[in-house]
Amino acid sequence: MSKLIFLLCWLLGSGGLAMADTAAKEDKGKELYLSYGCALCHGRNGDGHGINAQKFNPPPTNFHESQAFLHGRDKDSIRRSIQYGIKEDSSIMPAFEDIPPEELDKIIDYLQSLRRP
C-alpha cells in the first residue's frame, strides 16, 4: 500500500506529471506515425527498417540516429520534410501536406523522442 501511495504522490508532483504528459504525447505521436503509414518505410519503431525500406537508396531515415536527420533535427526542419517531402539527394520522401498541424506536432515530438543522445 505504501508503494502505491508513494507512486501517486510522485505522479502528482511536478516531475511525475510532466513525465506522464510527455509519455502520453509520445504515445499519441506514435499512434499517428503508424496511422499515416510512416512505418512502411521508416519502420514500426522508427529504425529505418520498414517493409519498403530495401527499395530505397538512400534508405529511409533511422530516427534513433541524430546524424541521420540530413535535412535538420529541429521541429521546423522535420515539419518541412514531412509536409513537402524530399526530392533531392536521390530521396523520394513523399509530401504529407494534409496532416493537420496539431497531429503533425505530435508526430514530430514522437520522432524527436526516438533520438539517442
Image (cartoon, grey):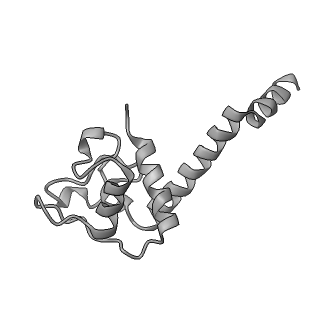
Q: Is residue 67 left or right of residue 22?
A: left
Quadrant of residue 116 within the rendered picture: top left
Q: In the rendered image of this protein, does residue 56 appear above or below residue 20?
A: below
Q: In the rendered image of this protein, does residue 20 appear above or below residue 42?
A: above
86 or 1, nearer to the observer: 86
At x 35% / y 41%, what residue is drawn? 64
Q: In the rendered image of this protein, does residue 47 appear above or below residue 96?
A: above
Please provide percent x and percent y for residue 102.
52, 65
Q: In the rendered image of this protein, does residue 48 appear above or below residue 104?
A: above
Residue with the most extreme bottom position = 98
Please provide percent x and percent y for residue 85.
26, 67
112 or 43, nearer to the observer: 112
Please provide percent x and percent y for residue 72.
27, 49
At x 43% / y 68%, what residue is drawn? 36
Q: Is residue 89 left or right of residue 41?
A: left
Please provide percent x and percent y for residue 55.
18, 61
